[in-house]
Image (cartoon, rainbow, N blue to C red):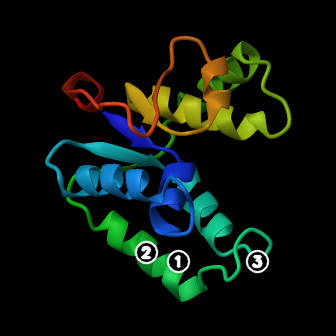
């Protein structure tokens, strides 16, 4: 299974961003496809926080626009919202230590731990900080998503 990081969701929903077309194309392919894919539960709130943030976008999405965009995405029959299991805390601590993840990197460690917890094989992201985690596969926009990373 492939999971989608917040930055891909943001790029897909903000037309003025340079990576908008590529992100929208890949997100649409996942949402309209039959192969299971996931969104880490933590990315839902982060997506809403980012696209409604007045200091990041002028104008930002309204709350109604943002929640409607997220609701449409979650209507995809192939999407799974990835939620932590009881094993998550141990996986989080391990990911934190593995990448020496302090400060803002703690959020990335949380995503890595959740993906590992859910059996996700690949994270679609533009965030290079994920490269700090060993044995954690990432794909960037424009890279081919092969069937193995989606299975």
x, y percent for residue 144: 30, 31
Q: Residue at x 45, y 61 (%)?
A: 12
Disc 3 packing (10 Å; few <14; some 14–19; many ≥20)? few
- The residue singled out by tag 2 in the image is 69
- Residue beneath the point at 33% across and 49% down: 26
**Residue at point 48% right, 37% down?**
85
Q: Secondary structure at mark 2?
A: helix
Question: Residues at badges 2 and 1 in contact (C-beta under 8 Å)?
Answer: yes
**Along the polypeptide, which appears first: circle 3 or circle 2?**
3
Where's residue 115, x and y in %?
A: 48, 32
Q: Which residue is mark 3?
A: 54
Q: Quadrant of residue 139?
A: top left
Residue to which mark 1 is pinned: 66
Give whichever of 58, 119 is nearer the camera: 58
**In the image: residue 57, left or right of residue 74:** right
Circle 1: is it few (<14), some (14-19), or many (20+) Cα within 10 Å? some
């Amino acid at each position: 299974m492939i999971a989608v990081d917040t930055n891909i969701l943001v790029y897909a929903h903000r037309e003025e961003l340079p990576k908008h077309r590529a992100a929208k194309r890949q997100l649409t392919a996942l949402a309209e496809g039959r192969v299971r894919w996931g969104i880490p539960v933590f990315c839902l709130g982060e997506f809403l926080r980012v696209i409604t943030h007045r200091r990041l976008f002028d104008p930002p999405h309204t709350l109604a626009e943002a929640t409607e965009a997220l609701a449409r995405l979650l209507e995809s029959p192939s999407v799974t919202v990835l939620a932590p299991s009881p094993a998550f805390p141990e996986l989080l601590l391990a990911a934190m230590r593995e990448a020496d993840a302090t400060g803002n990197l703690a959020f990335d460690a949380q995503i890595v731990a959740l993906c590992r917890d859910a059996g996700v094989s690949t994270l679609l992201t533009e965030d290079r900080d994920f490269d700090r985690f060993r044995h954690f596969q990432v794909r960037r926009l424009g890279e081919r998503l092969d069937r193995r990373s989606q299975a």
